[in-house]
Image: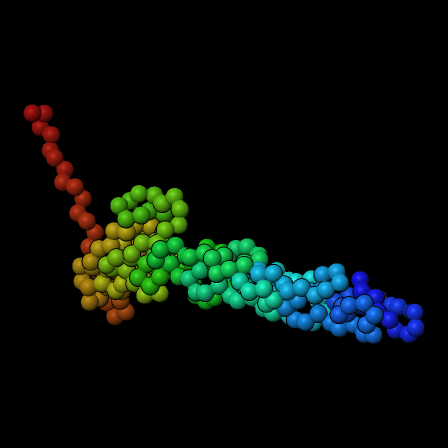
Amino acid sequence: MVWVVCAGTSCTPCDPGFVTGGAGQSQCSPCLRGQRQAGLVCELCAPGSFSTASAATVCTPCAPGYYTDLAGSQQCQPCPVNTYNPAERGASLTACLACPSNTVTHGTGSVDELQCVAAPGFVTVQPGELLPGDTVATARVAQPCGAGFNCTFGAPSVAAMAVLPGYWRSTSWTWNVRVCQHAVGCAGGNMDGANMQSLCAMGHTGPCVSLPAPPARRSWNGG
């Protein structure tokens, strides 16, 4: 607390956020934006914190998704696209972590890796879903969608991959995409227990897809 001379020998303390330039002063001055009162003086906010108003007594930490590497900041900067920062007080650009390979963010200031989504042409395989080759994913990983799928804007999961017209797959969890028998009339999609008629485009009817033939049975003659 700083005391000032107001009249004669009568002194009163400066209000919070105000200081004087030394003893025997007649008035108090507010700490500037980007500063805070620290005892008898104003000091700059440390990197990772800021103050937007004058006469501040504390500096506000940067929120998750933001950072500032400058002392005396009046605001924090958002993490760039394709990065995220889950913690407060980001004091440098390195606080913004890069998204995993083949994933992107839809804007700046992301706070969680879950905001990193599949880039165009890729799908985010979720834990428990099948990877190409029918191995089970144990963590989120982006993979190329491959032929027969429409991932123009990226896909959030294998189940969400859109099947292109002229193609079909037996279930929403498989990567095995097949060409329709009559591609012109095949709207494309997932069977998932539906009948073949459901994959026909408007104005078409009949078996638009061809199911694999059952394995041939061998006759047993005892010999």
- Identity of the residue drawn at 66% across and 67% down: 35
Q: Is residue 193 visible?
A: no
Q: Left of 209 or right of it: where is 3?
A: right
* Of residues 13 and 150, the one drawn nearer to the viewer in this rendering: 13
> Which image quarter is the C terminus in?
top left
Q: Position of residue 42 (x, y in %)?
A: 70, 65
Q: Nearer the viewer, residue 123 or 198?
A: 123
- Give percent across and percent down for residue 54: 69, 71
Task: Tell me: 8 left or right of 136.
Answer: right
Using the rendered image of the protein, determine whether residue 146 is visible from the camera's viewpoint: yes
Instruction: Using the image, determine if residue 123 lies above or below residue 8.
Output: above
- Location of residue 46 by image quarter: bottom right
Q: Is residue 108 found left or right of 49 in the rendered image?
A: left
Pick the front one: 119 or 131: 119
Structure colour scheme: rainbow
Q: Nearer the viewer, residue 16 or 5?
A: 5
Q: Quadrant of residue 3?
A: bottom right
- Image spot of residue 113 (x, y percent): 46, 55
